[in-house]
Amino acid sequence: MLENFIGLFTSPDGFVTPVVVTVQMVAVILVGQMVFSVLAAYAFAQLRFPGRDLLFWVYIATLMVPQVVVVVPLYLMMSEVGLRNTFWALILPFVLGSPYAIFLLRENFRGVPSELMDAMRIDGAGTLRLLWHLVVPLNRPIIVTLVLITVVTHWNNFMWPMVITSGPEWRVITVATSALQSQYNNNWTLVMAGTTLAMLPLVILMVVFQKQITRSVGEATLR
């Protein structure tokens, strides 16, 4: 019912701050991950430098490390530099690229026809121009899919925000939804309203971009 959603935003510990913090966090992480992942993937796919393959596989090997293993070291690092319970603590561990995104983009960037790249080089195109005007447009479906995966992953991120923040100032929407279950034990209508609100943006994104996801999966399978 509508009054349950109104109650979420009008209560003292409402959803206004968590929604704003979550949107800001996801936006910064999304921009950072896409920029750095695209640059790194292009370097691993098309540039030649000593130790390229070894560095790539060592970086990709971090995918096998569970998140729970790195929570304590990351917490200690953030505490040592005075960033605990700050916005920077929420974004710094994730903003400089994603091993999964770099791996997926590298495999797709390697499939760009060398003839097209050679033709642009003959026309005087540099590395960045090749990347932004040829490689990225040819791989737009997989980039859109990675954007959606990044948004969903960090919108739903619960463990790290719960560990590194305390109090309502930098509480994200997943932590706020979890807090509702203890704060309103006897009012499950508010709990369900909060859960619905947390899920709604992700459902809308998936419905709007489902064709892009299907297309990118099909192209990746063919490659």
Image: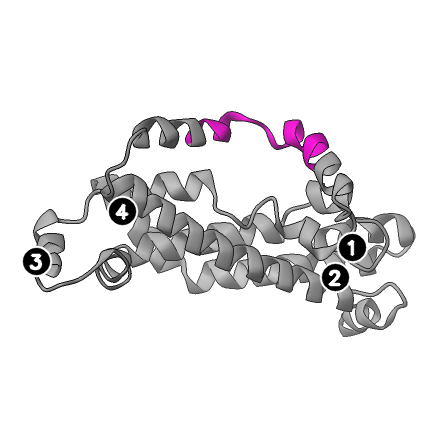
Tell me if I can see residue 105 in this picture: no
Three-letter code for the amino acid on which mark 1 is drawn:
Ala
Instruction: Check the picture and name the quadrant holding the C terminus.
Output: top left
Answer whether residue 68 is magenta in the image.
yes
Answer whether residue 33 is magenta in the image.
no
Tell me if I can see residue 41 in this picture: yes
Q: Nearer the viewer, residue 213 or 169?
A: 169
Q: Earlier in the sequence, mark 2 or mark 3?
A: 2
Q: Earlier in the sequence, mark 2 or mark 4?
A: 2
Q: Earlier in the sequence, mark 1 or mark 3?
A: 3
Q: How many marks?
A: 4
Point out residue 7 in the picture as x, y percentages from the top left corner: 84, 70
Residue to which mark 3 is pinned: 119
Q: Nearer the viewer, mark 4 or mark 3?
A: 3
Residue depicted at 80% across the width and 56% down the height: 191
Residue to which mark 2 is pinned: 18
Residue to which mark 4 is pinned: 218
Q: Earlier in the sequence, mark 4 or mark 3?
A: 3
Could you tell me if the residues under marks 2 and 1 are in contact, i.e. CB atoms within 8 Å?
Answer: yes
Instruction: Check the picture and name the quadrant holding the N terminus.
Output: bottom right
**Picture quarter containing residue 49?**
top left
For label 2, the SS is helix
Three-letter code for the amino acid on which mark 4 is drawn:
Gly
Q: Nearer the viewer, residue 85 or 105?
A: 85
Q: Earlier in the sequence, mark 2 or mark 1?
A: 2
Residue to which mark 1 is pinned: 176
Q: Residues within 10 Å of mark 2 (few under 14, many from 20)?
A: many
Residue depicted at 67% across the width and 50% down the height: 90
Q: Nearer the viewer, mark 2 or mark 3?
A: 3
Label 2 to label 1, Cα distance in Å?
A: 7 Å
